[in-house]
Image: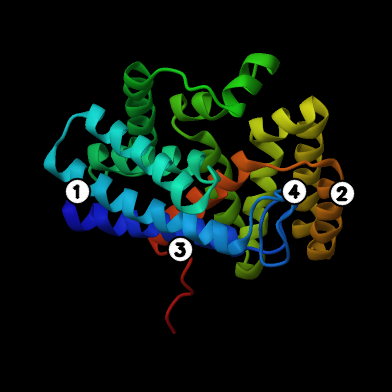
Amino acid sequence: MRSELRRLADNLVRGAFLELYLTPKPGLVDLNDAGSHHDLSISRMEASLAVVSGYLRRLADSLVRGEELTAQVRLGIEAEQAMLERAGTNCHKGYIFLSGLLLAAAARSHRAGEAALSAAVADVAARLFEVAGQDDSNGSRACDNYGARGIRGEALDGLPALFREALPAFRCELAAGNRGSAAYAMLGRLMATVEDTTALHRCGREGLRTVREDGRALEQLVEQRDDFMSFLAQRNEHYVSRNLTMGGVADLLALSFAWLSHTGELEPPRQ
């Protein structure tokens, strides 16, 4: 199990880098610009992911040793603190939670398939929130203000955005022979469906509505083989002008890339 968990840990890091480098993405850091994150840059995000990498390796070792959940929660808290010290930002706080949750669930589901993994995610999340409680974050405040479920609800439901939305969107596009646009089909599906508390925190319900409408528009452009890249670049300008972003979508996109990397679906078939 150790080697399998280590491999998943490595793919969770790879997924985050793939999300970071996917360009363009409205309101998010990418190879073109920092989107609506004036305090971030590619180099700062890379420094943050170096911390995430070390955390996930330590977490995998902890899971192999069969340590208590409290020990794994402590590793996450230490990673958040190290991220602030090294990168000066909490940009991957949500991903520390989501990637750690998926890794812990994988240790319990023993490669029994995605349905079993989703159920294990929900089980681990329920236990985790009993141990850790509710944190004081922008996302939790947005949940309180707008009655949203956010990342907490997503986790307790077994990550439906990953298993029921993003992965099927990618696989459908891939099955149609469109590998190059599959990542954007996945991005569009997440934008259209995720209850993104970062968007809610920054721009209220109107901001979330904008993200969801743009997600549906992106899906349509991908389906019609239209110029979705120009659309995304144009929308980035709009998001920056409104200080709108979508951190929850970014975290779940990274998680989706990670799982597809782990299953080998990101790699082109061998001739």
Residue 251 position, x and y percent, is 55, 45
Choose top left, top right, bottom left or bottom right for residue 184.
bottom right
Say which mark, if any, is on residue 36. Answer: 4
Q: Residue at x 65, y 30 (%)?
A: 197
Give the alpha-carbon distance from disc 2 to disc 4, as whole Å: 10 Å
Between discs 1 and 4, the one toward the N terminus: 4
Q: Amino acid at mark 3?
A: Glu
Kindly report which numbered mark, 2 or 4, lies closer to the viewer in this rendering: 4
Give the alpha-carbon distance from disc 2 to disc 1, as whole Å: 44 Å
Q: Residue at x 80, y 54 (%)?
A: 236
Q: Residue at x 77, y 52 (%)?
A: 218
Residue assigned mark 1: 61
Q: Amino acid at mark 1?
A: Asp
Q: Amino acid at mark 2?
A: His
Dot 1 lies on which element?
helix
Q: Are marks 2 and 1 in contact (CB under 8 Å)?
A: no
Between discs 3 and 1, the one toward the N terminus: 1
Residue 15 position, x and y percent, is 47, 57
Residue 175 visible = no
Dot 2 lies on which element?
helix
**22 vs 191, nearest the viewer:** 22
Residue lying furthest bottom in this view?
271
Q: Are marks 3 and 4 in contact (CB under 8 Å)?
A: no
Q: Residues within 10 Å of mark 2 (few under 14, many from 20)?
A: some
Is residue 161 found left or right of 271 in the rendered image?
Answer: right
Picture layout, residue 114 above or below residue 157: below
